[in-house]
Amino acid sequence: VGRGQARVGRDGTTVGRRWRGVSGGGAPKNWGAPAGRAGLDRAPISSAVARMGAEASLAYGDYLTRQNAKADRTYADLMQALEQTGRDRTLAAADVLNNWGLVHYLGDIRKAEPLYRRSLELHRSIEGVDAVGPVILSNYAGVLETLGRFEEAAALYQETMRSAHERNDPRVEMDAALCLADTYSESGRVQDAAATLAAIEPRVTGKLFVPVRRAHLHSARGLLALARNDA
């Protein structure tokens, strides 16, 4: 995962995963099919919660196919529906907010910030301050880094690394370490950046360093060199 890129497809993005915990019913599985919204409108879905789960799947499908305007509208409607039914303080709502943030991550990052922040706040209030999954933390850290809020981003990347380590997720832990090094370099903390990269070096030859992660490492080294004025 490159610097400042949202983590997609792990525990940070969830389509229908939380609806079972909210209502006892799961979201339909086929809402990524070509029928799309027309199929949803014709479907005999009697449960409001099941319909919201289907809408979440449809919105995520729009995001994956880069129909971001559609996805944005659907997520806005979905959050309104959650608020109207008293479900806006649930993990389902937190997941909707996280996935909605993805819609704006590579567009207007300022719109993504409050969505990720609200998602993280919900996860902390429901799961516990120290029990939030690493991808939720990393997504918000990436937004803060992009916005130049480096001190906050660094703290969240460190928390991401701890959370990933506790869950035995070395990929997310390594990605967060690389992003932390970038954040340190961008904020002029060159000694911290160098120390972070030095801690990574013993693992460079391992299986974790697929091409995209190796490219990020080279980028991080270059960013540190620029920060030192010795590029």
Image: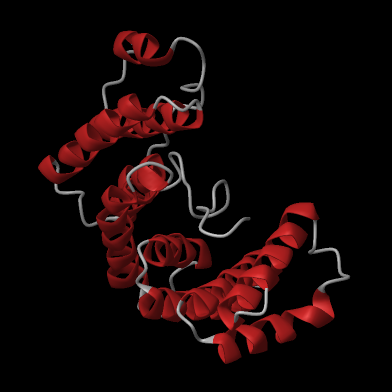
Image quadrant in which you'd find residue 54: top left
Q: Is residue 162 left or right of residue 21?
A: right
Check the image and report above or below for 228 versus 136: below
Check the image and report above or below for 47 versus 3: above
Image quadrant in which you'd find residue 104: top left
- Residue 175 at what x, y percent from top left? 63, 66
The mark tally for this picture is 0
Name, please, the residue furthest toward the right. 205
106 or 100: nearer the eye? 106
Taking the image as drawn, is residue 169 in sight?
Answer: no
Image quadrant in which you'd find residue 205: bottom right
Q: Which residue is drawn at 62% across and 76% down?
A: 224
Q: In this view, does 139 lie to the left or right of 173?
A: left
Q: Residue at x 11, y 41 (%)?
A: 84
Q: Is residue 206 left or right of residue 227?
A: right
43 or 57: nearer the eye? 57
Quadrant of the frame with the N terminus: bottom right
- Residue 18 at what x, y percent from top left? 40, 48
Quadrant of the frame with the C terminus: bottom right
Q: In this view, does 123 lie to the left or right of 106?
A: left
- Residue 122 at what x, y percent from top left? 28, 63
- Residue 197 at what x, y percent from top left? 69, 80
Q: Residue at x 80, y 63 (%)?
A: 209
103 or 189: nearer the eye? 189
Q: Which residue is drawn at 82% across and 72% down?
A: 204
Taking the image as drawn, is residue 138 in sight?
Answer: yes
